[in-house]
Image: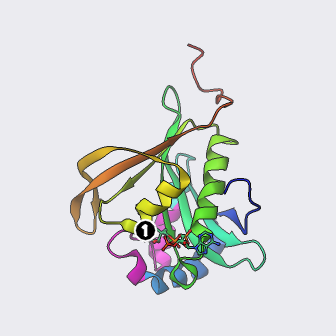
């Protein structure tokens, strides 16, 4: 998969994405429930954008190169440097274009960006045991199962158990300058 030319590209969120994003989220309510809540109003979008202000969270739209159409969203959240050099990812497809392989390709680009340019060493995805589409996605990408964490994230009004899936940087890997020398 990583060898194949990608049909999609990662486009960092900007304020100009608001209307397109909110209407795609609204159109995806059935697909996203109960796994993911994304902003569907201008107020909620504005609040969501503040999380990207300090660089600890990065957010991207996945767009089809040829048409510019937004097919999904991926976030690299809670980036921690030092001896960890890791982050967790969150993602969702938009319903009109789901199930066509775009999310898989967008996440391949996300891994490449995270382990390459960002020089992260570990990415996690935390997934509820019943979320078959998301589990299939990370399996396809080569994530490994690390265990079940009870009451791990507050989702859809309750603390939900999550499976922790993770992937480490392939070697050779160039360390980020913030990694201690020893
Ligand atoms: C999880 C989620 C992002 C997966 O999105 P998706 O659109 O199914 O992702 P993809 O299209 O890349 O998945 C590949 C599917 O497309 C199919 N496909 C069609 N054309 C394809 C192509 N050219 N290349 C690869 N796969 C292709 C695959 O067979 C696969 O379908 P299958 O697993 O049903 O057989 C989506 O279900 C979603 O948004 N869920 C709600 C939010 C959510 O749960 N987020 C994660 C929380 S942990």
* Image quadrant assignment for residue 106: bottom right
Q: Please state the horizontal and vertical placement of residue 159, each as a whole percent of the image.
A: 22, 58
Classify residue 170 as left or right of residue 89.
right
Where 162 sits versus 11, above or below? above
Q: Please state the horizontal and vertical placement of residue 146, each as a whole percent of the image.
A: 36, 42
* Image quadrant assignment for residue 97: bottom right
Give the structural element (helix, strand or loop) at label 1.
Answer: helix
Disc 1: residue Cβ within 8 A of ligand 1's nearest atom: yes
Residue 90 makes an appearance in the image: no
Can you identify the residue that label 1 sits on? 133
Where 51 sits versus 166, above or below? below
Where 133 sits versus 40, above or below? above
Which residue is nearer to you in this view: 158 or 124? 124
Residue 23 makes an appearance in the image: yes
Q: Which residues are magenta?
A: 29-49
Looking at the rendering, in which quadrant would you find the N terminus?
A: bottom right
Q: Please state the horizontal and vertical placement of residue 154, each as a whole percent of the image.
A: 27, 59
Q: Please state the horizontal and vertical placement of residue 76, each as a whole percent of the image.
A: 53, 52
At a point 57% along the width and 47% down the height, the residue shown is 55
Q: How many marks?
A: 1
Classify residue 64 as left or right of residue 110.
right
Looking at the rendering, in which quadrant would you find the C terminus?
A: top right
At a point 62% along the width and 54% down the height, the residue shown is 110
Packing grade of label 1 (10 A; few <14, some 14-19, many >=20) is few
Which residue is nearer to you in this view: 179 or 121? 121
Classify residue 38 as left or right of residue 110.
left
At a point 69% along the width and 53% down the height, the residue shown is 2
Which residue is nearer to you in this view: 29 or 173? 173
């Amino acid at each position: 998969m990583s060898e194949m030319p990608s049909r999609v590209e990662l486009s960092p969120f900007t304020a100009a994405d608001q209307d397109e994003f909110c209407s795609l989220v609204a159109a995806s309510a059935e697909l996203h429930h109960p796994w993911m809540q994304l902003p569907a109003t201008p107020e909620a979008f504005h609040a969501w954008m503040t999380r990207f202000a300090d660089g600890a969270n990065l957010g991207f739209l996945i767009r089809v190169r040829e048409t510019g159409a937004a097919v999904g969203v991926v976030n690299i959240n809670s980036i921690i440097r030092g001896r960890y050099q890791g982050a967790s990812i969150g993602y969702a497809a938009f319903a009109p274009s789901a199930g066509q392989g775009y999310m898989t390709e967008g996440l391949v680009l996300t891994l490449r960006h995270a382990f390459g340019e960002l020089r992260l060493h570990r990415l996690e995805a935390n997934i509820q045991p019943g979320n078959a589409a998301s589990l299939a996605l990370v399996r396809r990408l080569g994530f490994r199962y690390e265990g079940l964490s009870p009451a791990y994230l507050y989702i859809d009004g309750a603390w939900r158990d999550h499976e922790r899936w993770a992937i480490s940087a392939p070697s050779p890997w160039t360390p980020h300058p913030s990694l201690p020398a020893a």
